[in-house]
Amino acid sequence: MKTDYSKIEAKILEKPVLATDVSGIREQMTHNKNGYIVDNNEKAIYKGLKYLLDNPTVLKTISTNKGMEVVINNESKYNQFIKLCK
């Protein structure tokens, strides 16, 4: 699985990630836990963004960097990386 580093950067900065449901995305994030996944079309992206903006609790939940160990796949390297970024 190829890692999409733009998602890692967003999560480290505690920014929300809205992603389209393309190959491999569900291995990198869990819908409504550490990201928000929508169908890969303009209408779904719009609805997803609107939903997140209208639901600040969900937005805050998916904005944390919890769960990134799964994306990076190595907890010790993840912890080292986080220390470097602070």
Image (cartoon, rainbow, N blue to C red):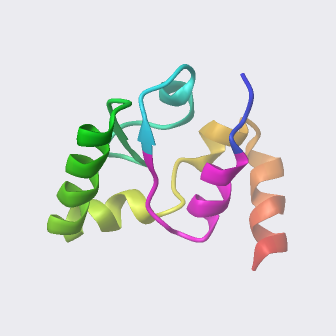
Q: Where residue 55 sits: x, y (%)?
A: 16, 64
Residue 56 in percent (x, y) is at 22, 70
Q: Please tell me which residue is depicted at 25% across the width and 39% down the height of the picture.
A: 44
Residue 62 highlighted magenta (yes or no): no
- Percent across and percent down for residue 51 are 18, 56
In the rendered image of this protein, does residue 75 appear above or below residue 60?
above
The spot of residue 32 in percent (x, y) is: 31, 45
Which region is colored magenta? Answer: 5-18
* Quarter of image, res 40: top left
Question: Left of 39 or right of it: where is 21?
Answer: right
Q: Residue 59: which quarter of the image? A: bottom left
User: Looking at the rendering, in which quadrant would you find the C terminus?
Assistant: bottom right
Looking at this view, is 36 or 61 the one in front? 36
Tell whether 8 sits left or right of 81. Answer: left
Left or right of residue 68: residue 60: left
- The residue under the point 54% across, 60% down is 65
